[in-house]
Amino acid sequence: MTCPICNDEKAISQPDGSRIECSCQLIARFKSYLGEWNRSGVQTVSLDLKTYARNLLFEDFFANRFNRLVASFLAQSFVGPKFSHKAVSGHDIIQAYFSNGGNVSELQTVPFLIINLGIDPPNSFYSQTLEAFLEERSRNAKCFTWVNSRYDVTSQTFSKIYQPELAAYLTAPMMKEVEGSALPQPRMRTDGTPVIRFQRIPKNLKI
Ligand SMILES: [Zn+2]
């Protein structure tokens, strides 16, 4: 569709002869930033970017609600920090490791990664591969990951596909090396509760 304002010239001439960018260009950049999530519809609710720019675990969320949350989060970050983002399945990560030309470092370093679980064929490599992958990502303070699981990670269905070890990893506290201790210790908040690797998002979250 031709832009009715600038006639696709991308800029508008001002009375003084200067040209300013047409608003359609901003909209185009916005759509390109949202990528595939542009179709999901953006809520006008405001999301605290700090609360959401971290490792989160969504379980048994309705797909359209989850998609809308991603779109709204990205929309809000468009005017702020802007996060490069990518969405993959567990199988995509295995492929990145094991197939020729797989680019695992790209997935390890993309600031905002969404991993969709529950849609993969069962495979005994998942827990080991995904744990190593997520450990590597957790070393980069700029990276955060949203795990979107079709099933509760503690369910048998989840374990059948990904093994119970992955469920345990996702719901375990974050560990840290402590001087004078041979074993890593759980990372604690100031209120004395452990920092969990992935914060579990309640199913009834309003969005
Ligand atoms: Zn225009």
Image (cartoon, rainbow, N blue to C red):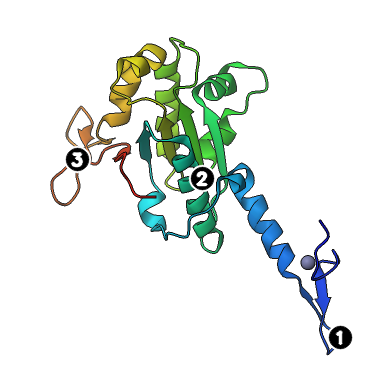
Residue visible at 44% across and 32% down in the picture? 136
Q: Where residue 38 sits in the image (x, y, percent)? A: 61, 48
Q: Residue furthest bottom?
A: 16
Q: Look at the image and tell me in which quarter the N terminus lies.
A: bottom right
Residue visible at 41% across and 14% down in the picture? 161
Residue type for callout 1: Gly
Q: Earlier in the sequence, mark 2 or mark 3?
A: 2
29 vs 117: above or below = below
Residue type for callout 2: Pro
Which residue has dot 1 on it? 17
Spatial separation of the CA atoms under disc 2 and disc 3: 24 Å
Q: Earlier in the sequence, mark 1 or mark 3?
A: 1
Q: How many marks?
A: 3
Q: Residue 111, which numbered label?
A: 2
18 vs 175: above or below = below
- Quadrant field for ligand 1: bottom right
Which residue has dot 3 on it? 194
Q: Secondary structure at mark 1?
A: loop
Q: Where residue 149 sits in the image (x, y, percent)? A: 41, 29
Q: Is residue 99 left or right of residue 108?
A: right
